[in-house]
Image: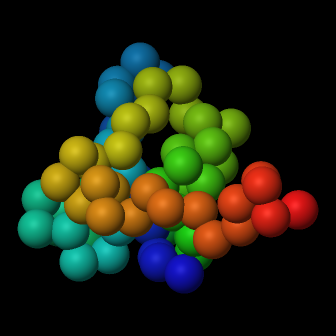
């Protein structure tokens, strides 16, 4: 599991960016809110989309955190 954070913005229409802990493009911690532990960026994005309107994942850190642990074909 990886810990994920999301950028803080107070305007409802602002774009919120999700970062995995250790992302080189991650802003200072006072500009972030803890999102939670997730297996990949897709799970973090899904959770953030329930709380915020405009959400995207950081292209820098989330490329390496996109693999799912459970694959649908293994069920």
Q: Nearer the viewer, residue 5 or 64?
A: 64
Residue situated in front as seen by the camera: 70 or 38: 70
For the N terminus, give its image quadrant. bottom right
Q: Where is 43 relative to 53, above or below? A: below
In the image, residue 32 sits, relative to residue 37, either above or below, namely above
Q: In this view, does 7 lie to the left or right of 43?
A: left
Residue drawn at 60 percent across, 36 percent down? 49
Residue positioned most to the top: 13
- Give the colouring mode of the picture: rainbow
| Residue 21 x, y percent position in the rendering | 32, 75
Which percent across, then down, holds residue 43? 61, 54
Q: Residue 14: x and y, percent?
A: 34, 25
Q: Hey, which residue is sitting farthest left in the picture?
A: 24
In the picture, the quarter occupied by the C terminus is bottom right
Would you identify the image quadrant in which residue 32 lies? bottom left
**Where is residue 59 drawn, in percent x and y?**
23, 46
Q: Nearer the viewer, residue 6 or 62?
A: 62
Q: Is residue 8 left or right of residue 26?
A: right
In this view of the protein, can residue 46 be seen by the observer? yes
Q: Using the image as rendered, state which of residue 35 and residue 45 is in the foreground.
A: 45
């Amino acid at each position: 599991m990886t810990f994920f954070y999301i950028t803080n913005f107070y305007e409802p229409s602002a774009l919120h960016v999700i970062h995995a802990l250790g992302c080189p493009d991650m802003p200072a911690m006072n500009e972030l809110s803890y999102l939670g532990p997730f297996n990949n960026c897709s799970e973090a994005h899904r959770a953030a989309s329930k709380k915020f309107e405009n959400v995207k994942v950081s292209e820098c850190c989330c490329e390496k955190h996109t693999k799912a642990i459970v694959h649908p074909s293994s069920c």
